[in-house]
Amino acid sequence: MGGQHIVDDRSRSGLDISTGILTGMIGGGVFGVVLHTLGEITVVSYLVGTRAEPLAWILLLVIGILGAITYYLTIRRFVLLEFLAAEPRTGAALGLAFGILLWFAAIIIVPVWIVFYGITSTIPYVHIPSLVGLVVYGMIVGGLTPLIAKHIDSEKKKVSG
C-alpha cells in the first residue's frame, strides 16, 4: 500500500466531493462531541450571532464538510502530500497539522467575524477546546480520507467496469 496514490485519475471531482462529505461529516461530528463534552458547543453558534446549540451542530457539520473537501483537494495538488496522505497513519499526521493550521486561522478570523454580530473578543482568541477539537477533527479527516477515497474509487470501478 505504501506510496499508492489515493486516486489514480485526478479528473474525478465527484470523488473529491464524496470523500470530503463523508470524512467531513464524521470529523465534524466528532469535533462537536469534543466541544459538547467540554461544555463549549455553543461557542460555534456565535459565528452566526446566536447561542442555539442545534445550529452549532449544523454549522459544525457544514464547516467540517467544507474543511475536509479543502483538505482533500489540497493534498491532491502536491505530489509529496498526496504520497504521504495515501496511508491512514501518515494521513492522520497530515490531518493533525491541518487541524492545528485551522486553529491558528480561526483564532484570528473568528474574533473579526463575530464583531458583525456585536460580539467582541480579543485577537487572537485562544480557545483551547477548539484546538483539541480541531486536532481530533484533522486526524480523523486525514486518517479516513485514504480509506474512504479508495473504497469509493473501487465501488465506482465496479459500477463502470
Image: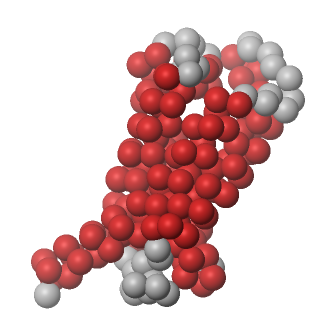
State the residue at coordinates (28%, 76%): 153
Nearest the eye: 24 or 31? 31
Nearest the eye: 54 or 38? 38
State the residue at coordinates (61%, 55%): 96
Relative side of 142 to 46, left or right: left
Circle count: 0
Q: Residue furthest front?
A: 89
The quadrant of the rendering that contains the C terminus is bottom left
The quadrant of the rendering that contains the N terminus is bottom left
Residue 80 picture location, percent across and down: 63, 82
Q: Is residue 42 above or below residue 61?
A: above
Residue 138 picture location, percent across and down: 56, 52
Q: Residue furthest right?
A: 123
Relative side of 154 to 2, left or right: left
Tell me if I can see residue 48 in this picture: no
Q: Is residue 78 above or below residue 117?
A: below
Residue 156 picture location, percent across and down: 21, 75
Tell me if I can see residue 91 in this picture: yes
Nearest the eye: 135 or 45? 135
Nearest the eye: 160 or 44? 44
Quadrant for residue 155, please give it: bottom left
Relative side of 78 to 105, left or right: left
Relative side of 110 to 48, left or right: right
User: How does the figure colour the protein chain or chains?
Assistant: secondary structure
